[in-house]
Amino acid sequence: MAARTAVVAGTATAVSGNVARRQQQRYANQQAEQQAAAQQQWEAEQYQAQQAAAAPQYAPPPAAAPSAAASAQGGVDVVAELQKLAALKQQGILDDAEFAAAKAKLLA
């Protein structure tokens, strides 16, 4: 009878030890995942902050007053459109070829 009690007690101790180790491992894995997620979030925020700081701040081109060119072209203000194209070229959005093609299309 004492041997049986010792076997049962030994088995219970082994099982509870395994359960405790498994729970500790799960907790450690959760902690590692949370830390990794927090690190990724922090890195993303830092990257966005760097991109915002590095992006040049351009003021939009001033709005041109309606001109006689607008009425001559059926509502299109050519001067204003040329100014917009020039601003886009200056900002680096349009290259020389794109600017020339858009200007030719506008003036045609």
Image (tube, helix red, strand yellow):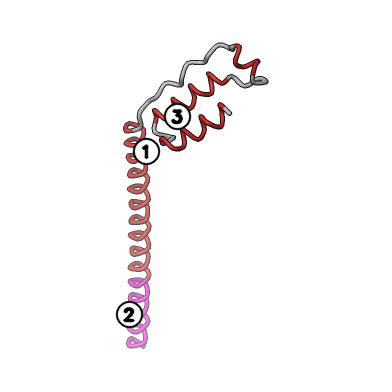
Type of amino acid under label 3:
Leu
User: According to the image, label 2 marks what residue?
Assistant: 10
Which of the labelled discs sits on residue 48, or is there none?
1
Q: Secondary structure at mark 2?
A: helix
- CA–CA distance in space, label 3 to label 1: 24 Å
Magenta residues, start to end: 1-18
Image quadrant of residue 87?
top left
**In the foreground, 84 or 29:** 84
* Number of residues whose C-alpha sits closer than 10 Å to that of mark 3, classed few (under 14), some (14–19) or many (20 or more): some
In the depicted structure, whether residue 65 falls above or below residue 59: above
What x and y, as percent, mark residue 35?
33, 51
Type of amino acid under label 1:
Gln
Q: Secondary structure at mark 1?
A: helix
Q: Is residue 17 magenta?
A: yes
Type of amino acid under label 2:
Gly
User: According to the image, label 3 marks what residue?
Assistant: 88
